[in-house]
């Protein structure tokens, strides 16, 4: 993990096309802004983990026999 210190209105760039900017600092909260191409999804980690969990559940409950019947 790379740890960086940034002040308000300072930014960092990832892969030449993603910019993360510190917008505001209040107590123990930091508000950040993310500029990225539209084709790159950006999620809060807890939302991302929930999506992954739901995808895994959907894959495990998929009836593969019914799917194979569709292609016959």
Image (cartoon, rainbow, N blue to C red):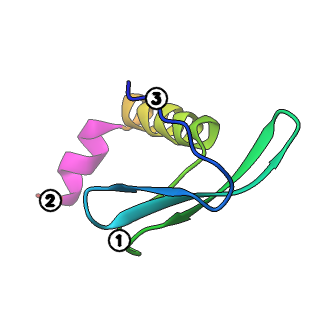
Of badges 3 and 2, nearer the viewer stands 3
Report if residue 17 is visible in the image. yes
Residue beneath label 1, please? 39
Q: Quadrant of residue 58?
A: top left
Q: Classify residue 32 as left or right of residue 2.
A: right
Report if residue 40 is visible in the image. no
Q: Which element is circle 2 on?
A: loop
- Give the number of the disc on residue 11: none
Farthest residue in the bottom direction?
38
Q: On the rendered image, what quadrant is the N terminus found in?
A: top left
**Is residue 35 positioned above or below 46 on the image?**
below
- Give the number of the disc on residue 3: 3
Image position, residue 17 (x, y; %): 31, 67
Q: Classify residue 23 as left or right of residue 21.
A: right
Mark pair 1, 3: CA separation: 26 Å
Sequence-wise, the earlier of marks 3 and 2 is 3
The residue drawn where x is 37% and y is 73% is: 37
Residue beneath label 2, please? 71
**Is residue 66 positioned above or below 38 on the image?**
above
The residue drawn where x is 35% and y is 71% is: 39
Of badges 1 and 3, nearer the viewer stands 3
Q: Residues within 10 Å of mark 1 (few under 14, many from 20)?
A: few
Q: Quadrant of residue 5?
A: top right
**Part of the protein shown in magenta:** 63-70
Sequence-wise, the earlier of marks 2 and 1 is 1
């Amino acid at each position: 993990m790379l740890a960086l210190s940034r002040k308000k209105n300072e930014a960092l760039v990832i892969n030449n096309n993603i910019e993360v900017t510190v917008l505001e600092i209040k107590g123990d909260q930091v508000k950040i802004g993310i500029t990225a191409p539209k084709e790159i999804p950006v999620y809060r980690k807890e939302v991302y983990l929930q999506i992954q969990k739901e995808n895994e559940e959907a894959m495990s409950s998929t009836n593969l026999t019914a799917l194979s019947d569709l292609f016959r």
